[in-house]
Amino acid sequence: MNFLTIDAANAIYECGGGLHIYRHPVAHAGFYRLCYAINTFERALGEAADDEYWATFIRLLKRYRFHMLAAPLPFDWQDPRIPDLEQRLSHHVARCHAIYPQFASQAHKLFDMFRLIGRSSDNPLLDCFLQVWYAQPEEPSAILVKESRLIPATEAVIQSNQALAHKRVDVISPTQADYARCYQQLFVIGSVCWFPDHIFSAPRASTIHVISYRWLANRWRPEPLFAGTPDSLSYRSFFIDTIPGMQAADAEESEVLLEPKDILPIIDAKALSKRLSHTESVLNPYQEDVPARLFVLAGDMGVFVEAADQTKVLAINLDNDDGNEDHIQRIPFNELTSGMFILLRTEGGGDYIVEVADKLMGPKLAQRVRQSQIRWKSLLRKVVEQRGLFETCLDLIDLGSQLANETNVRNWMASRTIRPSKEDDFRAILRLVGLEAEFDAYWKDAKIILEAHQRAGFHIRKQLLRQVRVSDLQLLRKKDQIKFVLPEADGGSLTAFRIEYVDPDIVQVPISRLGELFPLE
């Protein structure tokens, strides 16, 4: 939750007091046919749509469709994540006759529709924005887009327009809007259903213009955010089609509304984990899989975090205003939420806390205690492979373990878990794998690793706090990625990425991929 000061709340209340909301429907027949044809073709595929061949083809087209619906970009805009989109789609349809001949004709027609639109420099959303802005060129103004990754491209389009290049037109995302100043005009691109209610019920502008294609549904019933706000404030002038004197783009009877929820990109955590596991199994057939949760990050990036009770992640919570030192915290993975910043190693490679801990221990001691840890874990995994997880738990209980269950045994086997917290559980493991005689030595080695990790965590946090103390937190709130160069880490760095979405599903992921940043596409 984002906390507002009294002054900020008053400013928002005053800003919304004279709120007028206008909707501006945009037309483009060719783009409409493409949007609708994607849905038609996907339905025609039926069960074949789940095949990776078609899933990739449809995913790429839907991604392009979303970008064109969600930002004022020209149709020939090149997604930096997929700069060769037309070529990739062309390769797909070229193989269709051999793989799925029954869909070849429809696939080629769909591709031809895309190619016709994708080579056009038309930008209907920008044209509409300019028409409205020229009629009321009030500053400051802002353009609100659904995804923060679309901000740089939108800013580039705005700056390339001579009339706007030297005007105050900000481009913001919904999260950034929470901390934005109040504008004279806010231009919302896309369906209102894509945005939080407070964008409209606690507005940062006295006039809001909703610019979207006329076939994109905009059903929404605004509710007042502030207690005692009269109903007329929320409903007055909502979705007046145009500003008086401007011409509306009336929908044709033949156009079918597209549901906004069906347009939003869907991140399939299970499919991602399956692809990662397949890749790792080829490179390393003995790769360990662990339960993990997918975090979707700003910039169209993702990371898998181990879903274990003891997993804590270094994060920045800007909503904590008790003082700078409290912004950086080690937060349990299941308490991380959208809007927080997760800290990941982006330069220098490797697991940073392990690397720092090993430096603090020294190379000889680090190598010895790490080998000690690897040995008992490897032996435990072999027992689980032979006996199964359930039987291994029963064996450990018989040998004196108090907390042996399937979840805990998985955690104990995981490379990132140092040791069980209870001596009885650790002794039972060593009895099971034939190392009980060396219990004291193994327990001592595990204690050395644990203390080194604690010191490393303190060391990292101390460096980060120095960075935060000299940072402008108001500026940080406007960004989606924050890079912290750690001078004592041989030129390494940590980058804080804003969490956009936390997938609720737990999936199995190769342990080597935990904490590894990767592009979602």
Image (spheres, rainbow, N blue to C red):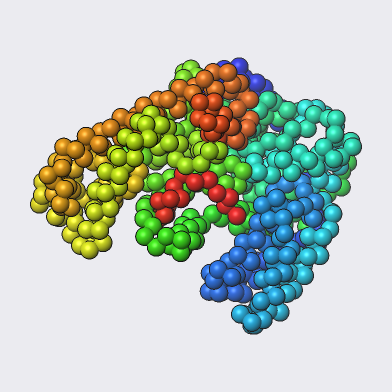
* Image height of 201 relative to 488, above or below: below
Q: Position of residue 253 (x, y in %)?
A: 76, 63
Q: Residue at x 71, y 79 (%)?
A: 105
Q: Taking the image as drawn, is residue 408 in sight?
A: yes
Say whether residue 50 is left or right of residue 159.
Answer: left
Say whether residue 178 is left or right of residue 117.
Answer: left
Q: Taking the image as drawn, is residue 249 in sight?
A: no
Say whether residue 291 is left or right of residue 273.
Answer: left
Q: Position of residue 486 (x, y in %)?
A: 53, 28
Q: Position of residue 76 (x, y in %)?
A: 79, 55
Q: Position of residue 311 (x, y in %)?
A: 36, 40
Say whether residue 94 is left or right of residue 520.
Answer: right
- Which image quadrant is residue 452 in? top left
Q: Residue at x 69, y 70 (%)?
A: 91
- Who is closer to the viewer here, 239 or 39? 39
- Who is closer to the viewer here, 169 or 491? 491
Q: Residue at x 78, y 32 (%)?
A: 169
